[in-house]
Amino acid sequence: MKIVIGADHGGFHLKEMVGLLVTELGHEVQDIGCYSTASVDYPDIARLVCEKVDAGTVDRGILICGTGLGMSMAANRYAQVRAALCHDHYTARMSREHNNANVLCMGERVIGPGVAEDIVRTWLAVEFSGGRHLGRIELFSKC
């Protein structure tokens, strides 16, 4: 899969770790920044990731900030993006299985690297179950 990854300064360190993990898992990674802990605006990073997901030029995206909240709010403004803020294995699995999330959001200041690794592994491995869940996702266009 092609995965685009981005973070603001609050998620920089976790982004670096996650990028390596995703590569080790055999996926193609596009890192769009940020590239240091210097302050940046998270909506700008979310836009760079979500434009690629929205256009279908990548399969999925991963966004990281301090809490994951700002990134998830910014990401869900794009028509074809279904961003999920995940804090554990269960939310990662359900975001894919039931909601077909195509952008994963995490908070570096709320989860540690071990939990983040488990989330990413799960989120990349689980497929959308379809069925009754597809109809619910199609209702998003009416929101």
Image (spheres, grey):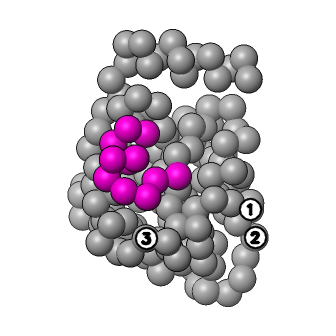
Crowd around label 3: few <14 · some 14–19 · many ≥20 (10 Å) = some
Q: Point out the stretch of residues depicted in magenta.
A: 85-95
Q: Going from the N terminus, do you reach mark 2 or mark 3 first? A: 2
Give the amino acid type for the residue marked by disc 3 in the picture: Ile
Quadrant showing the C terminus: top right
* In magenta stretch: residue 111: no
What residue did someone put label 3 on?
Answer: 111
Residue at mark 1: 44
- What residue is rendered at 46% in x and 17% in y? 134
Res 63 seen here: yes
Please state the horizontal and vertical placement of residue 103, each as a whole percent of the image. Answer: 52, 46
What is the C-alpha distance between the residues marked 1 and 3? 23 Å
Which percent across, then down, holds residue 71? 64, 58
Discs 2/3, front: 3
Dot 3 falls on a residue whose secondary structure is loop
In the rendered image, residue 91, in percent from the top left (x then y), is placed at 40, 47
